[in-house]
Image (cartoon, rainbow, N blue to C red):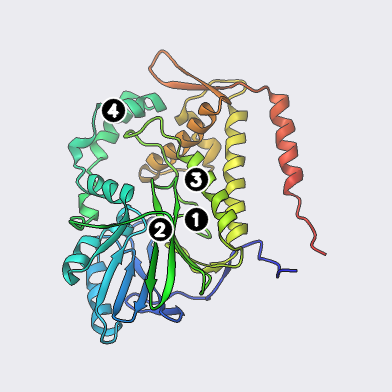
Amino acid sequence: MPPAQPSAPEYLFDDVPAPGELREIADGVQWLRMPLPMALDHINLYLLEDDDGWWIIDTGIAIGPTQALWEQIFATQLGDKPVKAVLSTHYHPDHVGMAGWLCERWQVPFYMTQAEYLSGLAFSRMQAEDFSWSSALHLQQAGYSPQQVEQARKRFSGFGNYIKPMPTAYRRLVDGTRLTIKGRRWRVVIGSGHCPEHACLYNEALNILISGDQVIPKITSNVSVMGGEPEANPLREWLASHEHFLDILPADALVLPAHNAPFHGLHARLRHLIEHHEEHLLALEEACVDTAPTAVELLPVLFKRELDDSQVGLALGECIAHLNYLHQRGQLARELNGQGQYTYRSVDDTLHLRLRRHRSELEDQPILQV
Ligand SMILES: [Zn+2]
């Protein structure tokens, strides 16, 4: 019988590496942290040692002390080996922010999937004036008042400050790409939902998964619908990716995530995330039985805490991701009201929902292992 897997994440270490220091995870695999200027105050990056140099996996954000910390690491931590390649798991600023600078500094190739590279190019060039009529319409349909839309327009400043100019060329990663580093093969495994084509790296010999933001032990990655693609269904992709990872990756893999800390318990975490979103979907359906609310009015169903200005945009994006999922599956009807806002109504009746809730609670009962 295989050993029992933990039902909650079990962390490899009790502490985290100090800024500018490396922590060895396995032979040739080093963990480091870079600060982030937000509530989520850090990102985990990884260095893979090859025979003739180092691979950098994710890069940190392009503001604050990141660049100075990189120089400190280069001066003190890499032995006599240069950096030989840079890889970003996806296009968000904490992951790709310093990629252009690093590739320029070392004149080395940059690895990324195509959808992430192109998204990064576009995203990093966005300016305040790119808040367009379609962005405004999206927020209006979500339930914003005209004044709230204007406030959102004023707050939007683009993302160029957080990302150095992107590398001018890249080497394309696809699902199944194999990278040989120090004689060991790292296989690219693609996930989707948090971003279009997120690369994870799995090494079978070490049984290690570098998971980026696709699997994080404590916080849940944002899965959002934004004005650029208002009919997107990223939650469907997110849930399908988790099912796929359950199929193809071993339960006992050591997971190296981009936030929180390295942990064991991959399958339990994936199952927990699937259940978390299923609970949210059911709660939204229930909230649309007797009334027909807008996305903005549904925010308290998903988020019990008070949301500040910096969080409400992502929270609303996440709420619409759940509503698009239900609408496109035919479980919620969607209509425009007199103010041009979408309202949602459950097509199922309360009794059905209660029965389904009851069933899912039964399935939640822990099964005793004998
Ligand atoms: Zn991240």
Name the disc covering residue 134, or none.
Answer: 4
Give the residue pinned by disc 3: 238
Using the numbered discs, state the Cα–Cα distance from disc 2 to disc 1 in whole angstroms.
9 Å
Q: Measured from the top left, where is residue 234 in percent x and y?
A: 45, 40
Which of the 4 quarters of the picture holds residue 350? top right
Query: Which quarter of the image is occupied by the N terminus?
Result: bottom right
**N-term-proximal mark, 4 vs 2:** 2
Question: What's under tag 1, amino acid-wise?
Answer: Ile
* Residue in the picture at 37% in, 31% down: 230
Name the disc covering residue 40, or none.
Answer: 2
Q: Measured from the top left, where is residue 120 in percent x and y?
A: 27, 50
Mark 3 Cα-neighbour bin, 10 Å: few <14, some 14–19, many ≥20: many
* Left or right relative to 194: residue 351: right
Q: Measured from the top left, where is residue 12 in percent x and y?
A: 54, 74
Q: Nearer the viewer, mark 1 or mark 4?
A: 4
Q: Are marks 3 and 4 in contact (CB under 8 Å)?
A: no
> Callout 2: helix, strand or loop?
loop
Question: What's under tag 3, amino acid-wise?
Answer: Trp
**N-term-proximal mark, 2 vs 1:** 2
> Callout 4: helix, strand or loop?
helix
Q: Are marks 2 and 1 in contact (CB under 8 Å)?
A: yes
* Left or right relative to 225: residue 152: left
Q: Nearer the viewer, mark 4 or mark 2?
A: 4
Question: What's under tag 4, amino acid-wise?
Answer: Ser
Question: What's under tag 2, amino acid-wise?
Answer: Leu
Q: Report the residue that reaches farthest toward the bottom.
A: 80
